[in-house]
Every structure is written in C-alpha cells, then in structure tokens.
Amino acid sequence: MRIRPVRRAELPLLQDIERAAGEPFRAFGMSAIADDEPPPLGVLEEYARAGRCWVAAEGPDDRPVGYLLADRVDGAAHVEQVSVTPAAARRGVGRALIAHLADRAAAEGLDALTLTTFASVPWNAPYYERIGFRTLAADEVGEELREIRAREAEHGLDRWPRVCMRRDLPPRPGA
C-alpha cells in the first residue's frame, strides 16, 4: 500500500469508495448514511488542488482503496472524511491515511488532529479511540468544530449520537 496525492482522473473512484464504505451502515439501521451522496467532483477537485486529498493505493495498477480529505480547523489538522472500500477494510488502510495526515500536520507545526464521528458505530468512535483519539468534552470544542457540528446537525446526522474527537501529536524535536 502506498499513500499518495490523488490524481485528478481518480476523483470518480473516490465517490465509488465512499458509496461502498457507506453500505455497512445499513446493518446499524443507518440507511440514510448509506444512501447519502459522496462529495461532488468539484469539491473533491478543490481538495486535490489544495493538496489536502490523499489516497491509499495498492496493487500493480496503483488503484485507490481508501482516501482522506483534510482541513485546518481550530488550528488542528481536521479529518474531514476518511473512507475505505469494504474489500480493503481491517487491513490498516484508514490508520495509514490518518498516520500520513499526522506526519504532515506535525511537519506544519500543528499539535493535533480532530474529527467528528458517530459515537456508537464500531468503525467510528471506538476505532478512533483505539488509534489514539479521545472524545472532547463540550467545553473543549473550538468554535470552528462547533460550526462543523452545526452543519452536520442541519444535514440530519444528529439522528444518531455524534462526537468530536482529538488526537494530540507529539511535539517535534527542537520545537
């Protein structure tokens, strides 16, 4: 597996990955999540142009099996989206994408990663806890992260419990 920037021609593949990654939500009674459309190509292209979209690619054809979109939120690197095709699940693809973002964030002098996620879905908050994230208390959530949560609520995501999470990054040597 190789983590690399997405290629413009691969953007439709990211939508396919997103749709496939949504399917397991049906088993949790979350069909609305499974049916939610992936980010439009224009949005994905903006992330790609800004250097904030990476793929995990594998095989001789270097085909993406997962991707991550990142923003900067409240001074931290924010995981806007991370999705892995079910065929590549449980092989460390998501963990590798998040580690790549952590390395980039540390190199930019950022001290944390943040994300929002479903509290009770096994491959959401419980997974992120296993890889070093912690759930933020209400008074720890910054203004920009609160704005993201408000948009998620408007989109109907609060039908299921959601949390904001943070993973502190180790200080850079000499910093």
Image: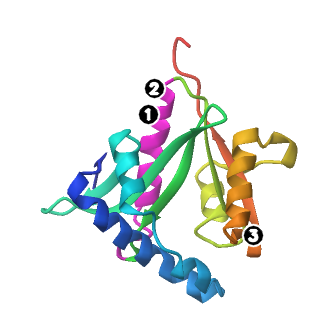
- For this orientation, the residue located farthest to the left is 60
Mark 3 neighbour class, 10 Å CA radius: few under 14, some 14 to 19, many 20 or more: some
Magenta-colored span: 87-108
**Mark 3 touches mark 1? (CB < 8 Å):** no
Q: Disc 2 or 3, which lies upstream in sequence?
A: 2
Q: Is residue 146 above or below residue 58?
A: above
Nearer to the camera, 81 or 126? 81
Whole-number angstrom distance, CA of label 2 to CA of label 1? 5 Å
Instruction: Identify the residue at image location x=58%, y=29%.
Output: 170
Q: Nearer the viewer, mark 3 or mark 1?
A: 3
Q: Position of residue 92 (x, y in %)?
A: 42, 60
Mark 2 neighbour class, 10 Å CA radius: few under 14, some 14 to 19, many 20 or more: few
Q: Is residue 88 visible?
A: no
Q: Amino acid at mark 1?
A: Arg
Which numbered tag is attached to residue 158?
3
Instruction: Identify the residue at image location x=60%, y=82%.
Output: 32
Which numbered tag is attached to residue 104?
1
Mark 1 neighbour class, 10 Å CA radius: few under 14, some 14 to 19, many 20 or more: few
Q: Quadrant of the C terminus?
A: top right
Instruction: Identify the residue at image location x=52%, y=42%.
Output: 71
Was residue 103 drawn as part of the magenta stretch in this picture?
yes
**Mark 2 touches mark 1? (CB < 8 Å):** yes
Left or right of residue 72: residue 1: left
Whole-number angstrom distance, CA of label 3 to CA of label 1? 31 Å
Q: Of helix, strand and loop, which one carries label 2?
A: helix
Left or right of residue 57: residue 138: right
